[in-house]
Amino acid sequence: MTTRFLHVDLDAFFVEVCRRLRPELRLVDLLIVGGDPRGRGVVQSASYGARAFGVRAGMPSAEAARRCPGATFVRTSFDDYREASRTVRRVLEEFSPLVVMAGLDEGYLDFSGTDRLHPVSLLPVAEQIRERVRAEAGLDCSIGIGPNRMVAKLASDAAKPRGLVEVREGWQEGFVAGLPLKALPGIGPKTAGRLKSLGLTEVWQVQAMPVEALETLIGVEAKVLKRRAHGHGGRVLRGRQETRSVSRETTLDRDTDDLARLERILLRLAAHVASQLRGAGLAARTVTLKLRHGDFVTITRSQTLPAPSDLDAEIIGTARTLLRTAFEEVRRRGRGIRLIGVAATNLTEAPLADLFEPPARTRLRQLTSAVDRVRERFGFEAAQPGSMVKRRDGD
DNA sequence: TCTGGGGTCCTAGGACCC
DNA sequence: TCTGGGGTCCTAGGACCC
C-alpha cells in the first residue's frame, strides 16, 4: 500500500488566536505572545511582522523587545488556545478518519491507500482543508504532503506561511537534499554543532557519504541519520499513547536560597501534580525534584515509593524530603535557585481500594477527596496544606 | 541577549538477583 | 579465591520537541 500523509501547521498560531479574540489587534502588525519583557519570560510566538525584526520563538522576551521596540506583547488563557485547536481538529477529522494532533498548532492526517480516490495529487484536498480551517477557525495554515510523516512536516515548513507543498513518492530524497541538517527531526542545537565541527551542515553531504564513513565519525547514530537524510521516517501514524509523566515547574522572579520560600512554592507545585494525577486516574511511583541554579546548572533528585500514590500528602512529603536532602549541596554551590519543579513518573492506573490499607492512609485518602470537592467548588487555591499558607510576617 | 513550561526518549552506572 | 553473563530496577543527566 502506498503511504501518504498531510501535515497541517497553523501559521503563528498563538498570535493569531489572540487576534481572533481581540479585534482591536487585527490591525496591529507587530505582535508577540510570550512572557513579560521586563521579567524572565521567553517568546512563545511572534507575528510575521515581528519576525522580520529577528524575533523568534524561544528568544528571551527582553531581547525581543529590544529587537522590535514597537511590538505589542499579548497573551490569553490556555483554554482559548485549546479551544481554537479543537476547532481545527474537528475540521481535519472531516477529511480523514485518522488525525493525530502533535501539539496545539499542528496535526497529521493519514491518506495512505487513497490512490483510487486521489490518484495523482493531494493538493486539491489540501486546498479544501486550508479553506475550511480559515472559515471555521479563522486561522491560516500551511500544509505539507509527503510519503511519510517526516517529509510531510518538512514540506509544511517549506510551505510557510499559507502555502501548500507536495512531495510525491520518489521525490523525497531530492527534496531533503537541499535542506540543512538541522532541519531534520532529532537534530537539535547540540547535534547540529557536533556535526558542523565535523564539516557536516547539509543533508546532501550525508547522502553522499557511505554509512561506514559516517559511523567512524559519529558512531551508532549514523544509521538513523543516514535514513533520515535519504528522506525516510514515519510511515505509520499512531495515536497518542499513555501519559508517562506529570510535572509542574516554575522560574522565580529572582534567584533565591531561602529554603522556607522554596518549600512553600514546591508544596504548591506538588499539590498540583497530585491533583492532576487524580484527575487522570493515575498514580505515580517516582517523585522527582528539579532545581536549576542561577548559572543554569540543573540537578534532579528522585525517589521511588514502595507503592504508587496520587495523594497530596505523599507526593508533597516526598518532594519536600528530596528538597531538604539536596539543600546542603545547593547552598554549597552558592549560586541561588532560579527554577524549582516536581515531576511524577513511573505512572500506573490509580489502584482500586485496598482492603488491607492502614487506617491512617484511608483517612488521608478521605481527606484528599474532601480537598478535591472544595477545590471543585471554590478553585484550587481554596484548599491548601497549612504549611503552604503564606505567613503574615513576609515571604 | 541571558535563556518558559510541559512533555518524550535515551544513556549509563550501580545494585541486586539468578 | 576469583569471577561468568544476563536481566531488571533505580537514579541522574541530557537532548530534543512543541
Image (spheres, coloured by chain):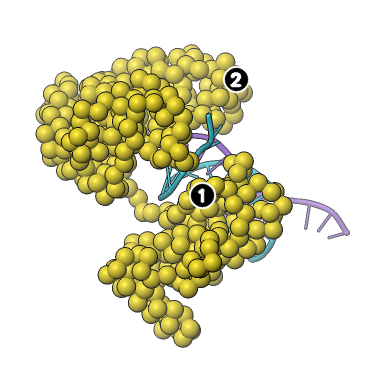
Chain colours: A yellow, B cyan, C purple
Per the image, label 1 sits on a secondary structure element best described as strand
The chain letter for the residue carrying disc 1 is: A
Image marks 1 and 2: residues in contact by CB distance under 8 Å:
no
What number is the disc on residue A121? Answer: none
For the point 48% across and 41% down, the residue is A40
Q: What is the three-letter code of the residue carrying label 1?
A: Leu
Q: Quadrant of residue A86?
A: top left
Label disc, if present, on residue A252 of the rendered structure = 1
Q: Residues within 10 Å of mark 1 (few under 14, many from 20)?
A: some
Q: Residue at x 53, y 63 (%)?
A: A394
Q: Are marks 1 and 2 on the same chain?
A: yes
Instruction: From the viewer's side, name the closer residue of A315 and A127.
Output: A315
| Direction from residue A65 to residue A6 in the image, left or right | left
Instruction: Establish if A232 lies above or below A347.
Output: above
Q: Amino acid at mark 2?
A: Ser
- Spatial CA distance of label 1 from label 2 is 36 Å
N-term-proximal mark, 1 vs 2? 2
